[in-house]
């Protein structure tokens, strides 16, 4: 069973394989990955049910250091770069009908966003410079490098408070949240860099400001791809920038859908001192669905991640006392796109969290 669980984290590579198969089959097959994620995975996820089992603290110390789990994420980093290069190549050599183009872009975004940003998120929390570099590399491919700053230094500090752009408010629909989170998170990342540089006595606008390079690098990367394929084809390939930025929008929209699902309506209590209580496993929605957690590197055990941000994905714990989602992320992101359905399901659970689960912590 332990071996099968370890092998399960390679299931993420199924998605890009389906994109490739769908492309070469042509036509409506370009929607194969979308159908797999939102029909097949959701169905199997429901049938397989929950996996609330946790490894012991003694085992966790050993398992955290196993290179195997890091290898999977390292491999994904290089694989995604190769996959995106292939995707740019095929759109540069073969014209697609509009419906094929839409399917191909959305399928690619599911890979670079659903899996790629998940891996970037995992790596970005680690102390290793190499892992953090890989995180930034992946975020560059979806035009969301500011996430590295905002998520680590902003979101994890302000989560479950009105100040956090990535915490959806009660009765806020996803579409309003998307605008607020995308815009405010980017601006907040600039402010965090300004504050960091100010503490060091450095100029706000200089090469030391990471937000300048994080903003520019995706355009340079896209420009390099466009130049390369245009040179090979002997003509300007406008499809490359259109494809690159389109799949990026799909990718970070998927990220924001996940943010919406993970923190909807959760608010930390203020203590007698006027500060917010410390983050604990009660402050994020949790989902320990077996199959979708394989594909998402246990991101759905989000309660433990916020309580222990540096923990590696393979040792994240399930907490019964955490607020629980009724389904895994693949199902919940679809529900989130239909506000009346979302509110009908989640507001009842949020009410239960307030009345029965939530226990104020007084320091």
Image: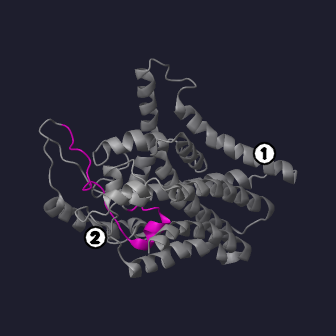
Question: Residue 127 in the image: x percent, y percent?
Answer: 46, 41
Q: Is residue 173 visible?
A: no
Q: Toward the viewer: 361 or 190?
A: 361
Cα distance between the residues tagged 1 and 2 = 49 Å
Q: Is residue 315 above or below residue 203?
A: below
Residue sitting at x 56%, y 59%: 72
| Between discs 1 and 2, the one toward the N terminus | 1
User: Could you classify mark 1 by the number of other residues whose Cα lies within 10 Å: few (under 14), some (14-19), or many (20 or more)?
Assistant: some
Residue sitting at x 49%, y 73%: 38
- Residue 295 magenta-drawn? yes
- Residue 110 magenta-drawn? no
In the picture provided, is 336 more to the left or to the right than 17?
left
Magenta stretch mostly in which secondary structure? loop
Q: Is residue 90 above or below residue 289?
A: above
Q: Which residues are magenta?
A: 275-300
Question: Residue 354 in the image: x percent, y percent?
Answer: 17, 59
Residue at image mark 2: 344
Nearer the observer: mark 1 or 2; the answer is 1
Q: Is residue 174 above or below residue 189?
A: below
Give the colour scheme shown.
Answer: one colour
Q: Quadrant of residue 206?
A: top right
- State the residue lying farthest toward the bottom: 47
Considering the image in quadrants, where does the C terminus appear? top left
Secondary structure at numbered mark 1:
helix
Question: Residue 191 in the image: x percent, y percent?
Answer: 42, 31
Q: Is residue 68 above or below residue 45?
A: above
Residue at image mark 1: 227
Question: Residue 160 in the image: x percent, y percent?
Answer: 28, 49
Q: Is residue 220 visible?
A: yes
User: Could you classify mark 2 by the number of other residues whose Cα lies within 10 Å: few (under 14), some (14-19), or many (20 or more)?
Assistant: few
Query: What number of labels is visible?
Result: 2
């Amino acid at each position: 069973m332990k071996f099968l669980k370890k092998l399960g984290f390679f299931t993420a590579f199924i998605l890009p394989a389906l994109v490739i198969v769908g492309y070469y089959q042509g036509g409506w097959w370009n929607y194969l990955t979308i159908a797999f994620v939102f029909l097949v995975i959701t169905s199997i996820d429901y049938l397989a049910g929950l996996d609330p089992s946790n490894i012991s603290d003694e085992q966790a110390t050993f398992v955290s250091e196993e290179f195997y789990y890091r290898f999977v994420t390292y491999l994904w980093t290089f694989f995604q770069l190769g996959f995106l290069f292939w995707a740019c190549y095929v759109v540069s050599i073969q014209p697609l009908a509009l419906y094929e183009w839409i399917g191909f872009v959305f399928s690619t975004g599911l890979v670079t966003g659903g899996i790629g940003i998940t891996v970037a998120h995992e790596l970005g929390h680690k102390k290793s410079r190499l892992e953090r570099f890989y995180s930034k590399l992946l975020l560059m491919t979806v035009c969301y490098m500011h996430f590295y700053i905002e998520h680590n230094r902003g979101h994890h500090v302000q989560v479950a408070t009105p100040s956090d752009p990535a915490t959806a408010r009660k009765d806020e629909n996803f579409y309003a949240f998307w605008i607020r989170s995308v815009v405010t998170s980017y601006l907040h990342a600039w402010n965090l860099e300004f504050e960091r540089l100010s503490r060091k006595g450095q100029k706000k606008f200089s090469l030391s400001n990471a937000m300048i390079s994080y903003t520019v690098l995706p355009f340079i990367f896209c420009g390099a791809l466009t130049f390369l394929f245009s040179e090979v084809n002997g003509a300007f390939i406008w499809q490359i920038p259109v494809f690159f930025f389109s799949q990026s929008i799909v990718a970070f929209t998927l990220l924001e859908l996940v943010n919406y699902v993970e923190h909807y309506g959760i608010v930390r209590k203020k203590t007698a001192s006027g500060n917010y209580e410390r983050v604990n496993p009660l402050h994020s929605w949790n989902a320990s669905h077996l199959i979708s957690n394989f594909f998402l590197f246990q991101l759905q055990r989000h309660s433990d991640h916020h309580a222990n941000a540096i923990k590696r994905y393979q040792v994240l714990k399930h907490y019964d006392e955490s607020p629980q989602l009724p389904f895994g992320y693949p199902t919940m992101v679809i529900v989130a796109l239909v506000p009346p359905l979302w509110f009908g399901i989640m507001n009842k659970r949020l009410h239960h969290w307030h009345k029965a689960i939530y226990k104020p912590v007084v320091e």
